[in-house]
Image (cartoon, rainbow, N blue to C red):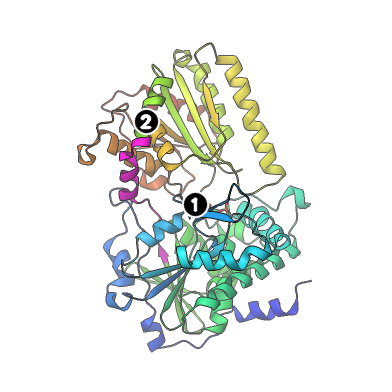
Amino acid sequence: MMSRSYTNLLDLASGNFPVMGREKERRRFPRVMTVPGNIVELDDEQANSVTSENPSSVAGDRMIIVANLLPLKAKRRPDNKGWSFSWNEDSLLLRVKDGLPEDMEVLYVGSLPVDVDPIEQDDVANYLLEKFKCVPAFLPPSLLAKYYHGFCKKQLWPLFHYMLPFSADHGGRFDRSMWEAYVSANKMFSQKVIEVLNPEDDFVWIHDYHLMVLPTFLRRRFVRLRMGFFLHSPFPSSEIYRSLPVREEILKALLNSDLIGFHTFDYARHFLSCCSRMLGLEYQSKRGYIGLEYYGRTVGIKIMPVGIHMGHIESVIRQADKELKVEELKRQFEGKTVLLGVDDMDIFKGINLKLLAFEHMLKQHPNWQGRAVLVQIANPARGKGIELEEIQSEIEESCKRINKEFGRPGYEPIVFMHRPLSISERMAYYTIAECVVVTAVRDGMNLTPYEYIICRQGVSGAETGSDLVGPKKSMLVVSEFIGCSPSLSGAIRVNPWNVESTAEAMNESISMSESEGVAA
Ligand SMILES: O=P(O)(O)OC[C@H]1O[C@@H](O)[C@H](O)[C@@H](O)[C@@H]1O
């Protein structure tokens, strides 16, 4: 049974807060997402509608960025005494910061990727606040199991990626105790925010599907708080979303934000249609700004695709360790044509479909046998479960089979790396690859194609001053089901479920002449 207090709390999430007139006016959010200007652009109206009316109102204000995971890496010290922490350069939260006004102070609230013993927690918290402006939320392991590995990973993550109904290893049904854990964990995050919040001056920017009921806990305490939410995953069609037993609770909780951001127009459209079908809400669209009227407040709905930070990528391109690695890779793959995949190990990334397509290409176009190599990098999964184990063993079996059938001395058709790669190592692989292949069956955005394009431009472009010379051809084969796909006009778009046509797209991409083979 859901405890009474949660029921009450989520009733409050109905947004019944009398916020009118002047209050509406002062809620202005800075534009916080960076986009690589030559790839995805917000139109002027989109960009300006948030900031231009009163840009100075944000300068000097503080932004509290809340997410499930802090943008930190943590390692136990070798002597086992304490921890060492460093920024996680791959965390999108750092890119969010890049898009804020320079003088804006940023504080991060979230959990750590490691389990810190309760007796160490105070010291760790003080250190992280002082050194990194990070406020850790230490969730008890039993809560983490039900909140993150349970409700997030087994229920929301599949649902938001169009998998129905609910995880097989939980009896294929909705588990209400996991939902309760999700609400409790969101409450714990909100308590951490409240510990540091200055409600008059701070903006709060909540990230991703892990924290969708958090706006309720903050709005309940601070009626005038300026608060935004950004969803990094897809928001599915209302036909999928409406199967969620707590569908209204989540929509209502999100509507306690002032602004809700999505990567793509389709995700925003799905959300609006859910609000209309499930809550009976109307929305208005004026000059590129969509507003949902909800209990006297206007909630802004915005399309704000996350991008990559060009300056950061370009600085990595110039790094010496990357250049050394490029030389090593050039020797390793001399005389070969490299296709590259860079994915998280996850059930929706379609890694096995990519391997099957590559196998099909080698069969249908035997001229590539001995010459084409698929390098697949798989970043280890954060989640766990039967489905993930199954997909991992499918991938391993495919690699073994294909390498056995087509491999020969000096030629391994699939090079599979199941480990995290540093950004500079990843850049080195982009540098030597002629084609990047993304076959995810769903993905919120996927920044791999953008990283590849920027890296390839850096490799051949004079403006970076780089004298690295990789192959000049740069092709992209991308799934039509990922957020970045519509923006990649030069890519070959595929339905990843159609292995034969993906195989043809791979063949086409690496068979193109140099003048044709430029993806962006
Ligand atoms: O896999 P987790 O820990 O739930 O995190 C999900 C997030 O992982 C990030 O790596 C992705 O860029 C996001 O799009 C995604 O929402």
Which residue is situated farthest in the top direction here? 409
Q: Is residue 66 visible?
A: no
**Which is nearer the N-term, disc 1 or disc 2?**
2
Q: Is residue 30 above or below residue 514?
A: below
Q: Secondary structure at mark 1?
A: loop
Report if the CB atoms under discs 1 and 2 are less than 8 Å apart: no
Q: Secondary structure at mark 2?
A: helix
Q: Which residue is mark 1?
A: 444
Residue drawn 53% across the image and 61% down it: 208
Residue 159 image position (x, y, % from top left): 62, 54
Q: Which region shows up in magenta? A: 302-321
Does the magenta run of residues contain 123?
no
Mark seen at residue 324? 2
Label 2 sits on what residue type?
Leu
Q: Is mark 1 within 8 Å of ligand 1?
A: yes
Spatial separation of the CA atoms under disc 1 and disc 2: 33 Å
Query: In the figure, residue 155 lies in which quadrant?
Result: bottom right
Vertically, is 39 above or below 321? Answer: below
Q: How many marks?
A: 2
User: In the rendering, at what x and y percent does residue 501 appear?
Assistant: 49, 29
- The residue type indicated by label 1 comes to Gly
Q: In the visual, does 118 lie left or right of 317?
A: right
* Residue at left offset 60%, top offset 25%: 399
- The quarter holding residue 401 reads top right
In the rendering, at what x and y percent does residue 268 appear?
46, 62
Q: Nearer the viewer, mark 1 or mark 2?
A: 2
Which mark, by number, is residue 115? none
The magenta stretch spans residue 307: yes
